[in-house]
Each structure stands twice: as structure tokens, then as C-alpha cells.
Amino acid sequence: MLLLPWALAGNLNAAQPQIRSRPSMDHNATASMQTAAAKHAVERYFQAADSGSAEAVRNAFLPNGRVEGVLGGKIVSWTAAEFAERNFRGSPPANVEAIRRTIEWLDVSGPGAVARVRVNIGANAVYWDYFILFNVSGEWKIGLKAFANPEQK
């Protein structure tokens, strides 16, 4: 009788599904599409900022989006709407041609993502922007933009 439970246990183990060590091709394609969509959301913000349109900047954010940063040595905190109204007046910034943005890295994890952006303005100013993004109802938008003062080269 002792052999019967042993034999049954062996048969149950044999029926266990195999675990894959690598994600499926479908998973890789979906992850790649999500990364591209999150990147597009950051680039949409770049285009909005370059246009000078407060409305376009607001639309790059979630309705409850925020902007936090260091300005003049002090911490600032605005809603996305306050940030847009404060900084964008309907026309491109005077120095728009001098602004170069590079997404240095982007990490997507499920419905959330984080991106680090290097912003060069002219030859002497370097800013760092950090974006927290969320995929809500199939659309990636910015939940938080955090920034730091420029470094002088």
C-alpha cells in the first residue's frame, strides 16, 4: 500500500506544466509596443513645450498631474495646469532652437513607466527631467514631471 501514494505523486508531477525561462514572443511584442507608446507620451510633451501651447502641455499630463522641482534653490510644486499656464504663453520659446532633449532611459513596468531626460539649452545649461507615466484606459500620460536646476558647463 505504501507504493500507491508514491506512484500517484509521481504521476501528478509528470502532469505539471513546464515553466518557460524566457518570455513568449507575444509578451516581447506587447512590451515593445508599450515602451514605444510611453516614449511617444514623453515626446508629445516635448512637442507641446516647443509649441508654447499651455493647452497642449496640459493635455500631455493626467488630469491630476503634477510638476515638482528646484527653482532658484527652492522647491516648487504645481499642478500640471498651473505649470502650463505659468510657463507657456501660446508661442514657441525664444530659445526653442537651442533646446536639445534626449531620453536617456525609459523603464516600463506594466501600466507605469519612468523616464530620465537630459535637456541641453545652448552650450552652458543642462537640466534633468524625470517623468513618471501611467497607462490609463490605453493612453500613456505624464503623472509627474520632476526637474532640477541646470548645471553650468
Image (tube, helix red, strand yellow):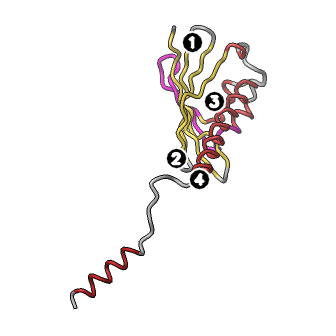
- With 90 as the anchor, is 114 left or right in this view? left
149 versus 139 height, above or below = above
Q: Look at the numbered discs 2 and 4 and tell me whether their residues touch, using CB distance below 8 Å.
A: no
Question: Which residue in the structure is indicated by mark 4?
Answer: 25
Residue at (60%, 42%) from the top-left corner?
Answer: 35
Q: CA distance from mark 1 to mark 2?
A: 31 Å
Q: CA distance from mark 3 to mark 4?
A: 41 Å
72 versus 41 height, above or below = above
Question: Which residue in the structure is indicated by mark 2?
Answer: 109
Q: Nearer the viewer, mark 2 or mark 4?
A: 4
Question: Which residue in the structure is indicated by mark 1?
Answer: 125
Give x and y (percent) for residue 39: 63, 37
Q: Nearer the viewer, mark 3 or mark 4?
A: 4
Q: Is-magenta flag for residue 76?
A: yes
Q: Is-magenta flag for residue 90?
A: no
Identify which amino acid the numbered label 4 is placed on: Met
